[in-house]
Amino acid sequence: MSSYYYKPEKSPQEKIEKDIDLRDRIELIQLEFPGYGYRRIREHFLREGLHVNAKKLRRIMREYSLYSVLAKEWVPSIINKGHLDRNYP
C-alpha cells in the first residue's frame, strides 16, 4: 500500500484554533456589515483571496451564534373589519 497520498490529520487543538481565527474574522466583517449572512461573508472572503467552504462557514456561525442582524419593517395587517365584507367580532 502506497503512502503517496497520505496526509496526516490535524490535531483537534489545531482545528479549534483555525475555527477561532475564522470566527474572529467573521466578527470583524459583521461589525462593519451587520446585515451580512454566510453567503455575503463568503463572497467577502473570496474577494480577499481566502477560500472558505460554505458549510464550514455556516457551522462556525451556528456554533458561535453569529447571526446577521436585520430589523424587519413593520407591515400592518390587511385583515380588518371592512375587508372582503366579512363579519368579525
Image (cartoon, grey):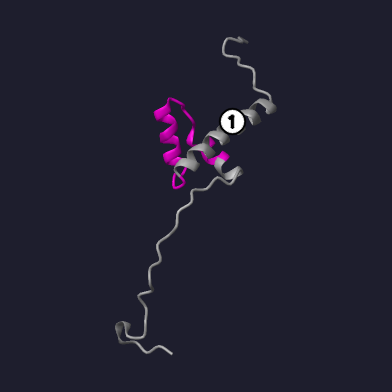
Quarter location, residue 21:
top right
Q: Name the residue beneath numbered marker 1.
A: 21
Q: Residue shown at 38%/72% (left/top)?
A: 76
Q: Is residue 41 magenta?
A: yes
Q: Residue shown at 49%/48% (left/top)?
A: 68
On screen, 77 above or below 66? below
- In terms of depth relative to the viewer, which is nearer, 64 or 11? 64
Instruction: Answer with left or right where residue 5 lies relative to residue 75.
Output: right
- In terms of depth relative to the viewer, which is nearer, 69 or 55? 69
Q: Residue shown at 53%/34% (left/top)?
A: 25
- In terms of depth relative to the viewer, which is nearer, 9 or 74? 74
Quarter location, residue 41:
top left
Question: Is the magenta region chiefly helix, strand or loop?
Answer: helix
On screen, 15 above or below 71? above
Which x, y percent locates residue 78?
A: 35, 75
Which x, y percent locates residue 29?
A: 48, 38
Label 1 secondary element? helix
Q: Which residues are magenta?
A: 34-60
Q: Give the amino acid at mark 1.
A: Asp
